[in-house]
Image (spheres, grey):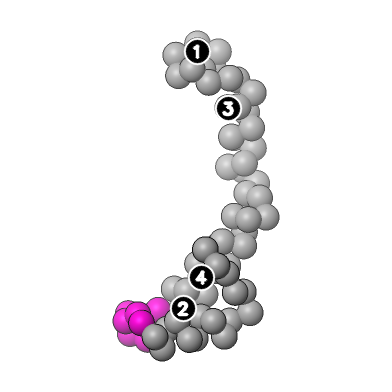
C-alpha cells in the first residue's frame, strides 16, 4: 500500500480516511440520497417530464434545498 500511495502522490492517512468515508457515508451524503430519491419519485410521477409542475411539487417537499 505504501508503494501505491507514493506512486499516486497521496498520503497513506488520506487513503485510510477515504476508505472510512466509503464504508460510512457522512450526514450530507445521507441527506443527498434522500433528496435524490424525492426528485426521482416526482420526476417519474410526472411521466419523466420536468418543468414548472415538477418544480412546484419539489418545493412543497419537506427537504428544501438551494443546491
Q: Which residue is mark 2?
A: 41
Q: Residues within 10 Å of mark 2 (few under 14, many from 20)?
A: few
Instruction: Say if mark 1 contacts mark 4, CB within 8 Å.
Output: no
Q: Quadrant of residue 23?
A: top right
Instruction: Say if mark 1 contacts mark 2, CB within 8 Å.
Output: no
Q: Would residue 48 be counted in the magenta stretch?
A: yes
Q: Is residue 40 above or below residue 18?
A: below
Q: Position of residue 64 (x, y in %)?
A: 60, 74
Q: Which residue is mark 3?
A: 15
Mark 3 and mark 4: Cα distance apart in space? 29 Å
Q: Would residue 54 be counted in the magenta stretch?
A: no
Q: Which residue is mark 4?
A: 37
Q: Residue furthest right?
A: 27
Seen at 54% across and 81% down, the residue is 59
Instruction: Say if mark 4 contacts mark 2, CB within 8 Å.
Output: yes
Q: Main secondary structure of the magenta part?
A: loop
* Numbered badge on residue 6: 1
Residue range corresponding to the magenta coloring: 43-51
In-image side of 63 versus 8 (left or right)? right
Mark 1 and mark 3: Cα distance apart in space? 11 Å
Q: Position of residue 60 (x, y in %)?
A: 57, 85
Instruction: Label 3, secondary structure: give it.
Output: helix
Mark 1 and mark 4: Cα distance apart in space? 39 Å
Q: Residue furthest front?
A: 66
Q: Is residue 57 above or below residue 23?
A: below
Mark 1 and mark 2: Cα distance apart in space? 44 Å
Seen at 57% across and 69% down, the residue is 65
Seen at 60% across and 27% down, the residue is 14
Q: Quadrant of residue 11?
A: top right
Amino acid at each position: 500500500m505504501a508503494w501505491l500511495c507514493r506512486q499516486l502522490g497521496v498520503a497513506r492517512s488520506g487513503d485510510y480516511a477515504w476508505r472510512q468515508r466509503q464504508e460510512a457515508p457522512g450526514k450530507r451524503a445521507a441527506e443527498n440520497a434522500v433528496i435524490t430519491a424525492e426528485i426521482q419519485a416526482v420526476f417519474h410521477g410526472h411521466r419523466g417530464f420536468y418543468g414548472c409542475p415538477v418544480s412546484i411539487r419539489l418545493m412543497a417537499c419537506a427537504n428544501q434545498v438551494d443546491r
